């Protein structure tokens, strides 16, 4: 029994025809009894008047709308894929799968951004066919941007998505896909979607600058002039040679996106804080079981060593040579939004003397991992970043702040989030909170502080990787009380936090603060647990982190590599990482007391 027209699903048929082959549409109408194909035309097409949507070399590309009259049957593509032993172009073609299908198959992981490939085959005349899903409830990217209520961070998120996709499309020689304005749109979910793939002209391949130029055009044509101005700044960097690769463009976009996300979150937080109702109070108490813990706990050291500040003995005192940094965040593979937030600020002064170049510098580095229902986690981490940044602008002038000043800053952030939680009068389980890890650098003196399970690591050539914070978790509290690690970590609540900022009053928040002196070249890494989970750093630091101690190493590439690695190994959570590289030299301006 044939399905009724109402049950049929529309699909797109994309097919390619060599110029020396006469165009043939192998489908009949739905009610045509002579139609021998499983696919039927969804509307009438005149074969002689069908125009290609693209021409590349000696091949023309066409599209028609079809319906599948036998959806219950296995497709030719599925049958042929069962014959494939190795997934490469040669094996696919030997199995009867046309080259036109290869990029769709390769990009399957990008669904629904890339249309799903439903069927594919090649006829005896050399025409290749692919059946892909038809976009429904789809609006063009320009129409979407024209809406005044689209948040800034959402606009830049879509541009960032295109930048990430460009890399894989470029490998497949399909970059033109992102340069066709009417091919870009947004679906019901609010996510970016493209209609179909376009192949590149191999004699005149697309350039990265064309992608940025298209962004500017779309934004300017759709009342997004403020965002177009920001993207024009990227174009200037491209023209000046500061941005030359898709990776450099992605890194620059990532910074813009994070700033837009922070601005939008803070605007939303000032308008209304989303606090769940009273009936979730009991869950909150269970989720945040904040038992008081001792502040004087030793850091977990990955390698052997008696103290987190044990360093090689030097004769001359050391002074700052350089301070470099980079911070990035990624939504991860399974989250719909990013609850992490971070801040980085450095100030460097250089002075040249006959003895050499001398630097003084300050660095403020902060990572927060938010938690809480609705937008609570995002708001909490953003509030913590804003509060701590402003606090240390006011309370950090010459030397490093002392321990009490640092603790008061963290407790002030706790107060701001706690007051926001109470403002509505609700005491629900969705009460928002956040972890915090913070590193303050003053020349070669460093202060580290934290609450929660976000971490700070230190990397040196002599001592390797050292974890210089201890998680505020149930398991760590148990181990501090003498319980064997195997027993403590086997508890079902082992990784439950014992501290966070925001859910409870200051009496229940006990920041850990330590002071370190940098006596050899050092990298400090601050991260959320999306990066540190599953001992990712412990297992990969020698290949990923140790080379970054070199002044020639690019920290942006290093951080991007870490985020990529975290998505491969973890990927279940948001991922944020800051790297701060401190290089030191003997202080030749200060006399050696041993001479």
Image (cartoon, rainbow, N blue to C red):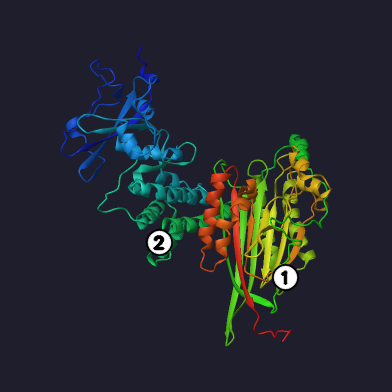
Q: Residue at x 52, y 54 (%)?
A: 561
Measured from the top left, where is residue 428 in percent x and y? 74, 39
Residue 243 appears in the figure: yes
Q: 595 or 564: which is nearer to us?
A: 595
Residue that numbered label 2 is attached to: 244
Q: Residue at x 17, y 35 (%)?
A: 21
From this view, report whether residue 483 is shown above or below residue 409.
above
Q: 336 or 16: which is nearer to us?
A: 16
From this view, report whether residue 398 is shown above or below residue 364.
below
Measured from the top left, where is residue 277 in percent x and y? 72, 37
From this view, report whether residue 127 is shown above or below residue 164.
above
Q: Residue at x 35, y 14 (%)?
A: 2
Instruction: Tell me whether the residue at label 1 lies in contact with that at label 2, contact meaning CB atoms closer than 8 angstroms.
Output: no
Q: Which mark is residue 79?
A: none
Residue that numbered label 1 is attached to: 400
From this view, report whether residue 342 is shown above or below residue 282.
below
Tell whether 300 sits left or right of 122: right
């Amino acid at each position: 029994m044939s399905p009724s027209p109402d049950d049929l699903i529309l699909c797109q048929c994309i097919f390619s025809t060599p110029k020396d082959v006469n165009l043939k549409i192998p489908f009949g109408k739905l009610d045509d009894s002579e139609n021998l194909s499983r696919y039927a035309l969804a509307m009438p097409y005149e074969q002689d008047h069908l125009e290609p949507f693209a021409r590349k070399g000696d091949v023309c590309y066409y599209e028609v709308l079809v319906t599948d009259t036998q959806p219950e049957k296995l497709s030719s593509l599925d049958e042929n894929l069962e014959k494939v032993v190795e997934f490469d172009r040669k094996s696919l073609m030997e199995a009867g799968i046309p080259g036109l299908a290869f990029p769709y198959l390769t990009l399957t992981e990008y669904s629904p951004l890339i249309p799903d490939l439903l069927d594919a085959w090649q006829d005896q005349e050399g025409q290749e066919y692919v059946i892909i899903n038809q976009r429904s409830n789809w609006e063009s990217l320009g129409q979407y941007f024209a809406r005044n209520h689209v948040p800034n961070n959402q606009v830049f998120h879509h541009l960032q998505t295109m930048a990430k996709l460009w890399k894989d499309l470029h490998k497949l020689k399909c970059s033109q896909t992102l340069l066709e304005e009417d091919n870009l749109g947004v679906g019901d979910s609010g996510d970016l979607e493209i209609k179909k793939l376009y192949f590149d002209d191999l004699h005149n391949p697309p350039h990265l600058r064309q992608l940025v130029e298209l962004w500017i055009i779309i934004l300017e044509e759709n009342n997004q002039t403020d965002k177009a101005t920001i993207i024009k700044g990227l174009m200037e960097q491209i023209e000046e040679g500061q941005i030359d690769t898709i990776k450099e463009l992605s890194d620059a976009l990532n910074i813009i996106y994070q700033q837009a996300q922070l601005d939008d979150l803070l605007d939303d937080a000032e308008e209304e804080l989303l606090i769940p109702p009273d009936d979730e109070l009991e869950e909150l108490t269970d989720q945040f079981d904040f038992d008081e813990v001792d502040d004087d706990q030793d850091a977990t050291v990955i390698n052997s060593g008696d103290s987190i500040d044990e360093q090689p003995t030097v004769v001359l005192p050391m002074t700052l040579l350089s301070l470099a940094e980079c911070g990035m965040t990624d939504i991860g593979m399974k989250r719909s939004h990013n609850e992490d937030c971070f801040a980085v600020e450095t100030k460097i002064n250089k002075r040249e003397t006959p003895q050499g170049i001398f630097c003084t510098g300050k660095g403020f580095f902060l990572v927060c991992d938010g938690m809480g229902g609705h937008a609570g986690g995002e708001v909490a981490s953003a509030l913590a970043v804003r509060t701590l940044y402003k606090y240390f602008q006011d309370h950090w002038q010459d030397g490093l702040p002392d321990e009490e000043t640092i603790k008061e800053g963290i407790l002030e952030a706790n107060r701001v989030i706690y007051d926001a939680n109470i403002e509505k009068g609700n005491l629900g389980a969705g009460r928002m909170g956040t972890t915090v890890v913070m590193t303050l650098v003053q020349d070669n003196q460093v202060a580290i502080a934290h609450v929660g399970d976000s971490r700070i690591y230190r990397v040196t050539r002599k001592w390797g990787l050292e974890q210089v914070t201890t998680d505020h978790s149930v398991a760590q509290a148990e181990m501090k009380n003498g319980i064997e690690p195997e027993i403590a970590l086997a508890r079902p609540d082992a990784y439950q936090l014992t501290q966070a900022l925001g859910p409870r009053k200051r009496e229940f928040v006990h920041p850990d603060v330590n002071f370190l002196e940098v006596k050899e070249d050092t990298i400090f890494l601050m991260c959320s647990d999306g990066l540190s989970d599953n001992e990712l750093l412990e297992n990969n630091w020698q290949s990923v982190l140790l080379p970054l101690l070199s002044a020639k190493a690019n920290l942006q590439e290093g951080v991007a590599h870490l985020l990529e690695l975290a998505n491969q190994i973890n990927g279940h959570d948001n991922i944020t990482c800051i790297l701060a590289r401190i290089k030191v030299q003997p202080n030749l301006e200060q006399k050696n007391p041993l001479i």
